[in-house]
Image (tube, rainbow, N blue to C red):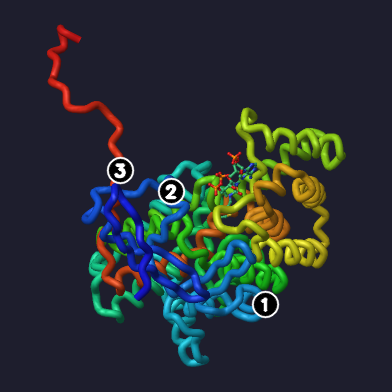
Amino acid sequence: MSTVKMNVEGKTIEFPSITGSESKKALDISNLRAETGYVTLDYGLKNTAVTKSSITFLNGEEGILRYRGYPIEQLAEKASFLEVAYLLIYGELPTLDELDKFTSGVTNHTLIHENMKKFFEGYPQHAHPMGVLASMTCALSSFYPESLDPNQEEKAIDQTILRLIAKTATIAAWSYKNSVGHPVMYPQNRLDYSANLLYMMFAKPTEPYEINNKVVSALNKLLILHADHEQNCSTYTTRVVGSSQASLYAAVSAGIMALWGPLHGGANQAVVEMLQKIYDDGGASKENINKWIARFKDKESGQRLMGFGHRVYKNFDPRATIIKKAADEVLDDLNVDDPLLDIAKELEFAALNDSYFIDKKLYPNVDYYSGLLYRAMGIPTDMFTVMFALGRLPGWIANWKEMVEDKQPITRPRQIYIGENKRDYMPIEGR
Ligand code: CMC
């Protein structure tokens, strides 16, 4: 075993070095505090690996993303979302028989308890569907109290996994129905996952609903592209909550909450809102684009170019490349002429040729074009992050499962206390 030596206050300490797949190196500092009294400070965990994992490989310098070793480009092109979900959760691509069983397992759980339907009536109509999805996902736990223990036998865990994948799609679609004041549509088990989701969102009891296969296929691709992304904010949140042995429902619900923020999954909604503002302000003219670019570079403005930049990708985000192409194709196929797409392209061109963005290695991320694609598919803006959540669900489950099976300890980091030293209580009259 190779080690790395560190000199701390004159004492030489050796830390085991770890080499992961693809020659990624790390330093195991588990004994740092015990041997030296020091802890490390790493805001945003920018330099800290929080776990070993065999689920997703990401190389931010070269723009590589692989699920269980399979390149994202191949999966997005050839696989179905449930096939990828199985791969992430169970480690291997399913055989025909395994996929059949998994698919029918999901299909058999698409209904939610009728009492849950009443919950929707309690939400105000303008409730953001991410809040509804998170709270309803947690509420699922109250209907299956027998499945709260994360250390149950495998069969019981598998059952919870199927329930979560199936029922969150129904909850998501119904939260949209609630927001527009329409009656909910019950799942159609003859449809595949993506088609059923679109059906539950857009079909009406008053008229027949025609499935558009191009939209179904674009949704399938988007869900796959979002399915996992190693230790991002929401996945790590899922692990943190799960590490206390809270139920899978609680852990996933926390993951949904973390995804909601505009610096994470909420960016897809923020991008389209930003593009709309730019459009209203003067459209795709060079002058207007330059004005906005200047604003994004100015820290005082408090505005960032949403959909640009990534903690890990410092070259390009491979998901953005696939989504940009898909957005062009879908808009073309569906004859959608979206002026926001022109703004997005002009803005991207200007940013990619501007030294601020070049020097800071800021490139379009997955959210830059995904919102435009969702728009073309008829998905309303405040449902964008919900679609991201449904896509990311298998990744959260896979990470939770890996953590539970590895028997990892509860997450409980240290802090560096910088408050007052000990002082005595002063009675109120003396303050
Ligand atoms: N527009 C303008 N400046 C930016 C941007 C941006 N989009 N992103 C980063 N910067 C600047 C930032 O001000 C900082 O400048 P300086 O070094 O002078 O202080 C520098 O670039 C590094 O930024 P950071 O915030 O320290 O980098 P980070 O790794 O902590 O943050 C990020 C990554 C994604 C939160 C950030 O790039 C960002 O806020 N982007 C916009 C929001 C967005 O699109 N989020 C979706 C991320 S991809 C989907 C997902 O997986 O969640």
Numbered disc in front, either 1 or 2 = 1
Label 2, on which residue?
121
The picture places residue 140, in percent across and down from the top left corner, at 35, 61
Q: How many marks?
A: 3
Q: Does dot 1 land on a helix, a strand or a loop? A: helix
Mark 3, residue position: 415
The reply to whether the C-beta atoms of the residues labelled 1 and 3 are less than 8 Å apart is: no
Q: Secondary structure at mark 2?
A: helix
**Location of residue 109 in the rendering, given as x and y in whole percent from the top left corner:** 41, 73
Amino acid type indicated by mark 2: Glu
Q: Quadrant of residue 177?
A: bottom right
Nearer to us: label 1 or label 3: 3
**Could you classify mark 1 by the number of other residues whose Cα lies within 10 Å: few (under 14), some (14-19), or many (20 or more)?**
few
The mark that comes first in sequence, 2 or 3, is 2
- Is disc 3 placed on a helix, strand or loop? loop
The numbered disc on residue 38 is none
261 vs 12, nearest the viewer? 12
User: Is residue 298 shown to the viewer in this render?
Assistant: yes
x 35%, y 77%: residue: 158
Against 259, is 329 above or below?
Answer: below
Of the residues shown, which amino acid type is indicated by label 1?
A: Glu
In the picture, residue 73 is in which quadrant? Answer: bottom right
At horizontal 39% and vertical 52% (from top left) the residue drawn is 135
If you read the primary sequence from the N terminus, does the residue marked by circle 1 or circle 2 appear first? Answer: 1
**Splitting the image into 4 quarters, where does residue 159 fall?**
bottom left
Report the Cα–Cα distance between label 1 and label 2: 40 Å
Q: Position of residue 66 (x, y in %)?
A: 56, 73
Viewer-proximal residue among 182 and 194: 194
What residue would you read off at disc 1?
A: 77
- Cα separation between marks 1 and 3: 45 Å
Would residue 140 be seen by someone viewing this image from the given angle?
no
Which quadrant of the figure contains the N terminus? bottom left
